[in-house]
Image (cartoon, rainbow, N blue to C red):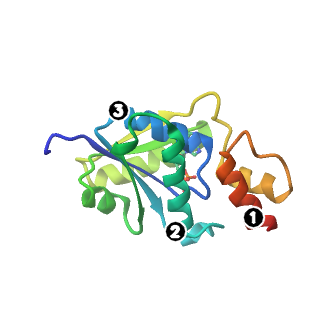
Amino acid sequence: MASEKIGIYPGTFDPITNGHADIIGRAARLLDKLVVGVAINPGKGPIFTIDERVELVREEIKYLGNAADDRIEVRPFAGLLIDFARDVDATVIIRGLRAVSDFDYEFQMASMNAKMAEDIETVCLMASDKYHFIASSLVKEIARLDGDITQFVSPRVAERLEERLHG
Ligand code: ADP
């Protein structure tokens, strides 16, 4: 359908947190279809492989428990974000904004992407107050130090992190 509003939500998702899941659920309600793009991103040195990250995101979506599940797709991607957007016919890029510290980077990215593709709009959703402090990098750090991460990620992700770091 040509008038379908398709958006992509790109990220590294290493691993997916409750904050990411919240953005996915909220973004899906704004769009006809949401494609969650898991960036291969070797530069960030992810602890989960691209296949593991994709699988974890897919599992989370199954458990999101909203009616939008069949309108959400998860795909790995490499290369330029705007090329990925074009591949899936998306006209919207969704990002999550946690704090002022996210703003500079997101603003710069959105501006560069807008210069390269002015038909694609970046939409930033404000992090929910329940999740605004959650970052994958800190969750990994806490898990590494044997801290309790159960309020930041799902039980499935917590288990996988435990296996990966201490298994
Ligand atoms: P990236 O490498 O692209 O920053 P991330 O997986 O860290 O990938 O984040 C993907 C997107 O999700 C980013 O827009 C980031 O700001 C957003 N995000 C991360 N954590 C949260 C959170 N707790 N609440 C809302 N948005 C978040």
Horizontal arrangement in the rendering, residue 135 relative to residue 76 (left or right): right
Along the viewing direction, whichever of 6 and 105 lies nearer the viewer: 6
Residue sticking out furthest to the right = 146
**Residue 87 in sight from this viewpoint:** yes
Query: First in sequence: mark 3 or mark 2?
Result: 3
Residue 87 location (% of width, % of height)? 26, 61
| Residue at which label 3 appears | 30
Query: First in sequence: mark 1 or mark 2?
Result: 2
Residue 34 location (% of width, % of height)? 35, 45
| Residue at which label 2 appears | 51
Along the viewing direction, whichever of 128 and 167 lies nearer the viewer: 167
**Amino acid tagged 3:** Leu
Q: How many C-alpha atoms fall within 10 Å of the one at disc 2: few (<14), some, or many (≥20)?
A: few
**Residue 103 in sight from this viewpoint:** no
Which structural element holds mark 1? helix
**Amino acid tagged 2:** Asp
Q: Which mark is residue 163?
A: 1
